[in-house]
Image (spheres, coloured by chain):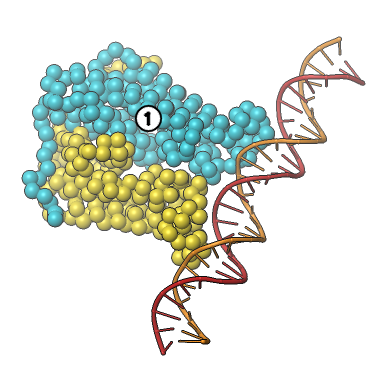
Chain colours: A cyan, B yellow, C red, D orange
Amino acid sequence: MQVFSKRGYHAAVVDEIADLAGISKPMVYLYFGSKEGLFIACIKREGELLTHEFQQAAAVEQGADQQLWAGLSAFFAHVAANRDGWVVLYRQAPEQGGEIAAEVERQRAAVMAAVTGLVRAGITESDSSAGLGEEDAEFVAHALVGAADSLTGWMADHPNEAPERITLRLMNMVWVGMRQVLAGEVWTPPAEPVEG
Amino acid sequence: MQVFSKRGYHAAVVDEIADLAGISKPMVYLYFGSKEGLFIACIKREGELLTHEFQQAAAVEQGADQQLWAGLSAFFAHVAANRDGWVVLYRQAPEQGGEIAAEVERQRAAVMAAVTGLVRAGITESDSSAGLGEEDAEFVAHALVGAADSLTGWMADHPNEAPERITLRLMNMVWVGMRQVLAGEVWTPPAEPVEG
DNA sequence: GAGTAAACTTACTCAGGAGTTAAGTTAGCC
DNA sequence: GGCTAACTTAACTCCTGAGTAAGTTTACTC
C-alpha cells in the first residue's frame, strides 16, 4: 500500500515492496502470483474495509442526516489513519486496464452506492421532496465523495483537525444547503449570460 | 494528453504519442527533450489554460456568488470539452517525483488559490461572518474543487447535462448551505457518541 | 543427528521501452 | 542543379524491472 501510494502502480517496484515487507521478491510471487495480483489484493482489502466501516457506522437506526454524519466520520477517521490505502483506491488505480480496473470499479461502486443510499434516504425523508429524485441523489453523492476525497488532502495539511470536525464542516456545507433546497430555497444564476 | 490520460504517465509509450501526433519519435525528443519534458509541457498548458478561463469568467465585477458561478461554469465547460487534460492534471500527475511534481503542485495551487479567493470574498461579503475565517475558506475551496473533480466523472456518465446545470446543482448544494451557515443556522451532530 | 519438507534467498533471464544514431527523403530557395 | 532545413524510417543501445530457477537455510520428525 505504502509503495503503491507513493509511487503509483507502474513506478512501484516489487523489490522495494518486498524489502519493506521484510520478505524477498519470490515470496511476493508465491503469495500473490503477480504484481497485478498483489495490487488487486490491496484494493480489495482497502475497499471492503472502508465500505464495511462506513456502513457499520451508518447502520444505526436514526435520521438520515445522522447516519450520513456517522458514515462520513468513519470515513475520515479511516482515511486519516490510513491515507495510503485511500490514495491507492481512489486516486491512481482507475487508469489501469483489465482485472485491476474491474476490481477498482467494483469497490468504488460499493462506496458510491452506500453514500447514494443515505443521500436518497435524506431526500425522501423530507416531506417536500422539492422535485429532487434519484439523479439528484447520485449527483450529491458524487459531489460528497469528491469533496471528502479532496479534503483528505486538506486533512493531511491540518493534522490537528479531528475527523469529526471535518465531517461537521462538510455536513454544514452540504446538508444545510440540501435541506434549504428541499425547503424550496434555491440559488439562481444571473438572468443574462455573463460573458459572450 | 490523450495517451497520458488513458494510460498514465509510466504506461504511456512515446511511440504511441508520436504516432497519434502524426510525427516520428525523434521529433518528440527534438521538441521536448524527454518524456518528462513533454509531460510537463502538457501539464503547464492545461493548468494555465484552466486557471485563465476560470479567472476570466470570474473576473466580471459582481457578487461573489455570481463570480463563483461563472468560474465553476467555465470550469465544467472546459473539462467537458477536454476531459483528458483534467484527468492528467488532477488525477494522475501528483504521484510522480521531481520536476513533474513541482509543476503539478504549482498549477494546482493556482487553481486552488483562485477558488479560495472567491470563497473568501463570499464569506467577507456577508455582514455576519459567523466566525468563519481563512481556514474555512480553504476548507470550502478544497471541498468545492474535489466535488467538481468528482462531478467530471458524473458528467461523463450524463453527457446531456449542460455544464451550467451541473454548476447550478453544485451551487445549490454548497452556496445555499454556506449562506445559511453564515446566517447562523448550523447542523449539529448527535450529542452522544453514536458508537463505542 | 540424518533425512526431509517447507520457507526462503541469491542470482539470474528476458521483455519492453526510453532515448539515440545514421541514413535517407522531401520541399523550398538561390 | 546543388544546398539547406525539416523531417522520417528503421535500426540500434542500454537500462530497468517483472518474473523465475536453482540453491540454501530453517525447523521439524523419527
Q: Position of residue C26 (x, y in %)?
A: 45, 72
Query: What chain letter is assigned to the residue under label 1?
Result: A
Residue drawn at x 23%, y 31% as measured from the top left: A174
Q: Quadrant of residue B21?
A: bottom left
Q: Is residue A98 visible?
A: yes
**Structural crowding at the residue carrying mark 1, measured as other residues with C-alpha within 10 Å and reported as few (<14), some (14–19) or many (≥20):** many
Percent of width and height locating residue A156:
40, 39
Q: Nearer the viewer, residue A89 or D7?
A: D7
* Up/down of D12 relative to A177, above or below: below
| Residue in view at x 30 percent, y 56 percent | B49
Vertical order, A185 against B4 (above or below): above
Residue at figure coordinates x 63%, y 27% from the top left: A31
The residue sitting at 46% across, 45% down in the picture is B7
Q: Secondary structure at mark 1?
A: helix
The quadrant in which residue A32 appears is top right
Number of dots carrying numbers: 1
Residue matched to label 1:
A76
Q: Quadrant of residue A143?
A: top left
- Is residue B97 in sight in this rendering? no
Q: Position of residue A74 (x, y in %)?
A: 37, 24
Q: Position of residue B66 (x, y in %)?
A: 14, 46
Asked if A78 appears above or below B5 in the picture, the reply is above
Under mark 1, the amino acid is: Phe
Q: State whether residue B54 is above or below residue A185.
A: below
Q: Is residue A129 left or right of residue B22?
A: left
Q: Is residue B25 left or right of residue A183?
A: right
